[in-house]
Image (spheres, rainbow, N blue to C red):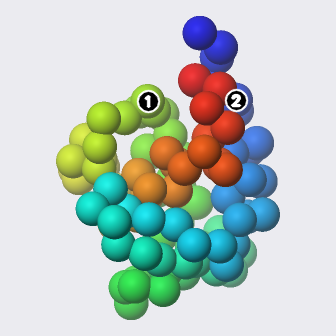
């Protein structure tokens, strides 16, 4: 198994995918925009932070968003972004 890439590489891919369609584990469609170190989601009225994604990334690989409930806001969206093949590149 390959080692996970450093988070900065993943964050770069997250930023590049801004505006693209993602899906939660339950199939909810969403997009996001990046503003500084914040992720603004299309389906909810609060933002996620780069720090949220970084905290969650330490737990990857994940079975599902429930594994993130106690550590980040918006676990369904964080999970969806980190698990998406365009972001993860399935290296780990």
* Residue drawn at 32 percent across, 56 percent down: 25
Compared with 81, 27 (above or below) is below
Residue of label 1:
61
Rounded to the nearest whole Å, what is the CA distance between mark 1 and mark 2?
12 Å
Q: Quadrant of the N terminus?
A: top right
Bin the neighbour count of mark 1 within 10 Å (Cα to Cα): few under 14, some 14-19, many 20 and up. some
Q: Is residue 75 left or right of residue 90?
A: left
* Residue drawn at 74 percent across, 53 percent down: 13
Q: Nearer the viewer, residue 74 or 43?
A: 43
Bin the neighbour count of mark 2 within 10 Å (Cα to Cα): few under 14, some 14-19, many 20 and up. few
* Residue drawn at 47 percent across, 77 percent down: 30
Q: x%, y% of residue 80?
A: 44, 56
Q: Secondary structure at mark 2?
A: loop
Circle on res. 84:
none
Q: Residue furthest front?
A: 27
Q: Secondary structure at mark 1?
A: loop
Q: Nearer the viewer, residue 43 or 11?
A: 43
Compared with 42, 9 (above or below) is above
Residue of label 2:
5
Q: Quadrant of the C terminus?
A: top right
Q: x%, y% of residue 39?
A: 57, 73
């Amino acid at each position: 198994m390959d080692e996970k890439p450093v988070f900065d590489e993943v964050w770069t891919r997250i930023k590049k995918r801004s505006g693209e369609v993602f899906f939660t584990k339950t199939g909810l469609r969403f997009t996001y925009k990046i503003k500084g170190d914040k992720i603004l989601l299309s389906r909810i009225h609060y933002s996620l932070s780069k720090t949220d994604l970084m905290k969650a990334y330490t737990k990857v690989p994940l079975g599902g968003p429930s594994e993130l409930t106690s550590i980040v806001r918006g676990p369904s969206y964080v999970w969806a972004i980190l698990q998406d093949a365009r972001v993860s590149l399935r290296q780990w």
